[in-house]
Amino acid sequence: MIAKVASLKSRHAERRSDAETLAEVFSMPLRNPGRTLLCFIIVFCLGSAFYLMQPAKYSAQVDVVVVAVTSSSQVAADRDVSIDSAVQILYSDAVVGKTARELEYPGRSSGLLRELTISPIINSRILRLYVSNTDPQLAYRAVKLLSANFLQERLTRLESLEESRREELQAHIKVLRTEAQEQQIEDIPISERREALAESSEQISELEFALSAIDTIPPDPGFISRQAAVPDTAARPPVTVYFTSSLALAIVLSFIVAPNRRSALSDARFAARASRPQLLGGINV
């Protein structure tokens, strides 16, 4: 009975001791308020200096807007005019790489990618492009050329798609005409021959109509770009990023720089925990 009571008291004391230990860990920065305050002051001063050292950049922007596609039904169905497809093309070497090479952009493609931001506008069909640079003219020319190269790449891909579709239709028409010629010399009833020839003729007419639509209606990129403007104000990155980073670093340093030695009260508690097993062992015997 005595051993059971001692065991319950021991568990209760251990739980209370664990809670006190956890509280001691979180209160470590408060053991030496002077050092903790010094950590915050140093970190925030360094963060502010680093923020002020960042060069202010001009941000040029242009909007790319999704528009309706007017073309043959089959080709229009094969086209992807979604925002996701536009982003994939914009990040491709045919757009970003070509723009960086034409402008001799600092850092080439990687440098342009670091300063390029693509932001879809929520609940709209607009894709907004930003290019930030210390030179406003370079930022303007980069964002303008990006949109132009994007539209050109879209048009090139659609022309390639239509050429593939044209070749496919021509091959299908050739096969149907060959089959129609073979049906004319086959030994089959006249009614069946007429029915087969009429069906082949109808299919050929539909394919020729689709082929004519491809040749008549020029491809449309499905996007348009609005006129860009030369930026006239420069800005640094958001200060909230530096503030939150400095705050997190200051908290971590306050735990490290705070004294690791335990207080006298803490030493007494740990000594009591160390002697408790011996007392319980004596009771159990």
Image (cartoon, grey):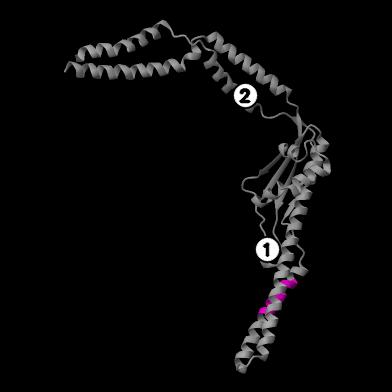
Q: Position of residue 60 (x, y in %)?
A: 76, 39
Q: Is residue 28 above or below residue 212?
A: above
The answer to whether residue 1 of the structure is visible from this angle is yes
Residue 50, given in percent of the width and then of the height, sits at 69, 22
Q: Secondary structure at mark 1?
A: helix
Magenta-colored stretch includes residue 144: no
Is 206 inside the magenta-drawn segment? yes
Of residues 84 and 196, the one nearer the viewer is 196
Picture coordinates of residue 159, whole percent (x, y): 75, 61
Residue depicted at x 57% and y 12%: 37
Determine whether the residue tagged by mark 2 lies in a helix, strand or loop. helix
Query: How far apart, in angstroms, are the residues tagged by discs 2 and 1?
Result: 49 Å
- Say the numbered circle drawn on residue 243: 2
The span picked out in magenta is 203-212
Q: As drawn, is 9 to the left or to the right of 166?
A: left
Q: Nearer the viewer, residue 273 or 37?
A: 273
Magenta-drawn stretch, dominant element (helix, strand or loop): helix
Q: Residue at x 68, y 85 (%)?
A: 180
Q: Which residue is mark 1?
A: 76
Q: Residue furthest left?
A: 1
Query: The disc labelled 2 sits on which kind of residue?
Result: Phe
User: Height in image: 63 above or below 171?
Assistant: above
**Is the Cβ of the residue at disc 2 closer than 8 Å to that at disc 1?**
no
The residue shown at (53%, 10%) is 33
- Above or below — where is 199 with respect to 252? below
Which class describes the residues within 10 Å of circle 1: few (<14), some (14-19), or many (20+)? some
